[in-house]
Image (cartoon, rainbow, N blue to C red):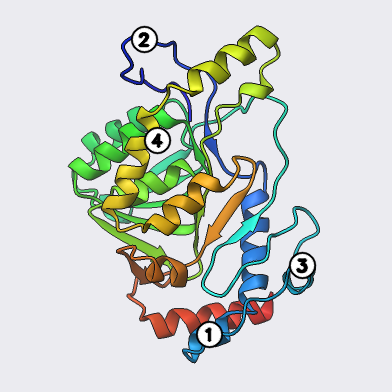
């Protein structure tokens, strides 16, 4: 997250200047989806027939995922659990660009692709004000800055908008989805969770790194706001704990079945927006995993 507000402590603290909730850099999320689907192949049929099988061993999980990607290793995923993909800690400051936004479907849908940059909420508000008939946001995003994301979440909530996730929604993007009046998730899309990334260690100056680490100790407002949106959407304590313990350079990939099991309130849809049953979702995931 970035540009967070003061924490509410008696003595004000300066805002960390480059903190962000970001998913894996570059094309990392596409890799995560492939890894997740490969691991899901071990689980999908068990879900489909309603029988839980024992959790695969670490060796089995590694073997299952190695055919789909050769980058970050994955932690073993017990049945019903998220797959945690391990990344590399960044040594450089993230350069987060604003997402591309466009109004589609005769003015009823705002399509968003890309990161939650500094101007994300401002641009969203301008488009919503200019297009009052927009009732749904279709989003694909790996996350971004905290203040812009939380402001956008409040905007979505005030306007009672539907948010549909296509492909993936990770990190700060999850708060936008959680804040929606109606949450939709395409059947094979994923939600990505991890810790806040203040990027303290990526700062070039030692004194600035120390100051950043100090400030993070008092920076609680963004965490409480983020968690509040997730709780309102039904995210269980298990998922909140998963988010808090997953390192900022890693990502916990959560599919529709795990979200349902953990109380998240959403509707699964196909690529055309038609509602899908849980059975249909599992059939699609099993088929896609088998092809991966």
Q: Nearer the viewer, residue 80 or 214?
A: 214
Q: Residue at x 73, y 27 (%)?
A: 91
For label 2, the crowd category at 10 Å Cα-Cα, with few meaning under 14, some 14 to 19 and many 20 or more, is few
- List x then y, in percent, for residue 169: 47, 52
Per the image, the residue denoted by label 1 is 52
Badge 3 vs badge 1, beta-carbon distance below 8 Å: no
Residue denoted by label 2: 12
Q: Upstream in the sequence, badge 3 or badge 4?
A: 3
**Where is residue 239 drawn, in percent x and y?**
44, 56
Indicate which disc, 2 or 3, sits on the residue closer to the N terminus.
2
Real-space CA distance between mark 1 and mark 2, rounded to the nearest whole angstrom? 51 Å
For label 4, the residue is: 223
| Label 3, label 4: how far apart the Cα atoms are | 32 Å
Task: Specify which label sits upstream in the sequence, 1 or 2.
Answer: 2
Q: Which residue is mark 3?
A: 62
- Where's residue 143, x and y in %? 50, 41
State the residue at coordinates (60%, 43%): 247
Q: What residue is drawn where x is 44% and y is 11%?
A: 14
Element marked by disc 4: helix
Q: In 3D space, how far apart are the residues under numbered discs 4 and 1 (Cα atoms)?
A: 34 Å
| Label 3 Cα crowd, 10 Å radius (few <14 / some 14-19 / many 20+) | some
């Amino acid at each position: 997250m970035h540009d967070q507000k003061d924490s509410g402590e008696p003595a004000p603290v300066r805002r960390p200047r480059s903190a962000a909730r970001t998913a894996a850099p570059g094309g990392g999320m596409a890799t995560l989806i492939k890894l997740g689907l490969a691991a899901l192949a071990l689980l999908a049929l068990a879900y489909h027939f309603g029988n839980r099988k024992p959790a695969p061993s670490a060796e089995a999980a590694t073997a299952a995922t190695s055919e789909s990607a050769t980058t970050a290793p994955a932690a073993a995923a017990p049945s019903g659990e998220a797959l945690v993909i391990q990344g590399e800690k960044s040594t450089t400051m993230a350069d987060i660009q604003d997402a591309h936004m466009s109004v589609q479907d005769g003015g009823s849908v705002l399509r968003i692709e890309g990161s939650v940059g500094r101007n994300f909420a401002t641009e969203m508000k301008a488009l919503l004000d200019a297009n009052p008939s927009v009732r749904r946001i279709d989003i694909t995003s790996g996350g971004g800055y905290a203040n812009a994301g939380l402001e956008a979440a409040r905007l979505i909530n005030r306007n009672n908008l539907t948010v549909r996730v296509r492909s993936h929604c990770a990190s700060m993007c999850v708060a936008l989805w959680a804040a929606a009046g109606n949450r939709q998730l395409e059947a094979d899309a994923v939600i990505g969770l991890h810790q806040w990334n203040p990027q303290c260690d990526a700062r070039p100056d030692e004194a600035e790194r120390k100051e950043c680490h100090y400030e993070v100790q008092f920076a609680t407002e963004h965490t409480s706001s983020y968690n509040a949106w997730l709780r309102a959407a039904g995210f269980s304590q298990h998922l909140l704990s998963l988010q808090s313990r997953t390192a900022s350079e890693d990502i916990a990939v959560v599919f529709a079945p795990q979200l349902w099991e953990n109380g998240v309130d959403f509707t699964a849809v196909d690529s055309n927006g038609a509602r899908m049953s849980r059975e249909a979702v599992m059939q699609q995931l099993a088929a896609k995993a088998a092809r991966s």
